[in-house]
Amino acid sequence: MRKNTDKAKEKLLFNEYIMQNFTQASKENISEYPDSDEKNRSLDYEIEYIISGKSSDKENLESVVTKIFFI
């Protein structure tokens, strides 16, 4: 039982880290992120990239929307 709670805690902390440190489509402005530096980012939608792994913001966003739709 403890092993399962440790895994759940680890997953929760990992997800929280991602949400605090990477950009996402639902934020209107990249400057809303702490320590944001627009010049050093290849993609604006980094969380969508982590989920989908596509090469463009558009592809990643479409992929995430499709995944959500099929839940």
Image (cartoon, grey):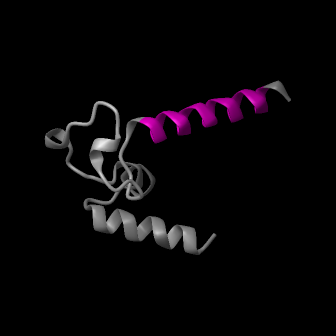
Q: Taking 31 as reference, is 54 above or below it?
A: below
Splitting the image into 4 quarters, where does residue 31 fall?
Answer: top left
Q: In front: 32, or 69? A: 32
Image location of residue 46, percent across then percent down:
34, 49
Which segment did they paint magenta?
3-20
Q: In this image, 55 relative to 25: left or right?
A: left
Q: In front: 48, or 36? A: 36
Splitting the image into 4 quarters, where does residue 20 fall?
Answer: top left
Q: In this image, 43 relative to 68: left or right?
A: left
Image location of residue 65, percent across then percent down:
47, 70
Quick check: is 63 in the magenta stretch? no
**In this view, which residue lies farthest toward the left?**
39
**In this view, which residue lies farthest toward the right?**
1
Q: Taking 60 as reference, is 66 above or below it?
A: below
Label tally: 0
> Which residue shows up at 70% across the image and 35% down it?
8
Q: In front: 43, or 25? A: 25
Quick check: is 17 in the magenta stretch? yes
> Which residue shows up at 62% across the image and 36% down it?
12
Q: Give the quarter of the figure containing the N terminus.
A: top right
Q: Taking 45 as reference, is 38 above or below it?
A: above
Image location of residue 41, percent across then percent down:
21, 44
Q: Give the quarter of the figure containing the C terminus.
A: bottom right
> Which residue shows up at 34% across the image and 43% down it?
32
> Which residue shows up at 27% across the image and 52% down it?
44
Q: In this image, 66 relative to 38: left or right?
A: right
Image location of residue 34, percent across then percent down:
34, 33
